[in-house]
Amino acid sequence: MDCVFCNIIKDNKVIIAENELAVAFYDNFPVSKGHTLIIPRRHVETYFDLNEEEMKAIFNLSQEVKKILAKLYKPDGYNVGFNVGVDGGQTVMHCHMHVIPRYHGDALNPRGGIRKVVKNEKKY
């Protein structure tokens, strides 16, 4: 199996933060400055395949990543989450958490966050 994310773990060149069970690196196709991915070291396809220790490791690492991004980029907000399955928008079939810095003015109306990617968005 040739997984682009497993290869990143092996190369260890672009990792910006890590712990025993997870690693973080900048997204190669960022939607904003500082867009970071956090993945488990073990190859699992989706969030729902993670074990409890991996979930904790990823969420703990997200706190470290947030500190790095806050210091380097000073974002005004964040979107954090997982895409699960092709129909959920997942393009690399290795579980990954997106930590997406948001900046004042990067969207005309950011209210509702990620809800805007789904048709028939709800009005708030």
Image (cartoon, rainbow, N blue to C red):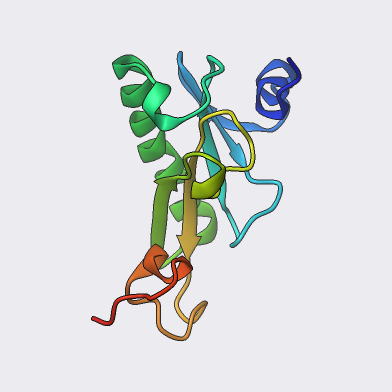
Left or right, 87 with reference to 79: right
Left or right, 94 with reference to 58: right
Q: Position of residue 61 (x, y in %)?
A: 41, 31
Image height of 28 relative to 56, above or below = below
Q: Observer-nearest residue: 77 or 83?
A: 83
Residue beneath the point at 38% across and 76% down:
120
Left or right, 114 with reference to 15: left
Residue beneath the point at 54% across and 17% down:
41
Q: Position of residue 66 (x, y in %)?
A: 41, 46
Q: Quadrant of the N terminus?
A: top right
Q: Observer-nearest residue: 54 or 50?
A: 50
Q: Residue furthest left?
A: 124
Image height of 37 relative to 113, above or below = above
* Label tally: 0
Q: Quadrant of the C terminus?
A: bottom left
Residue beneath the point at 44% across and 54% down:
70
Left or right, 84 with reference to 120: right
Image height of 11 relative to 106, above or below = above
Splitting the image into 4 quarters, where does residue 6 fall?
top right
Residue beneath the point at 28% across and 82% down:
123
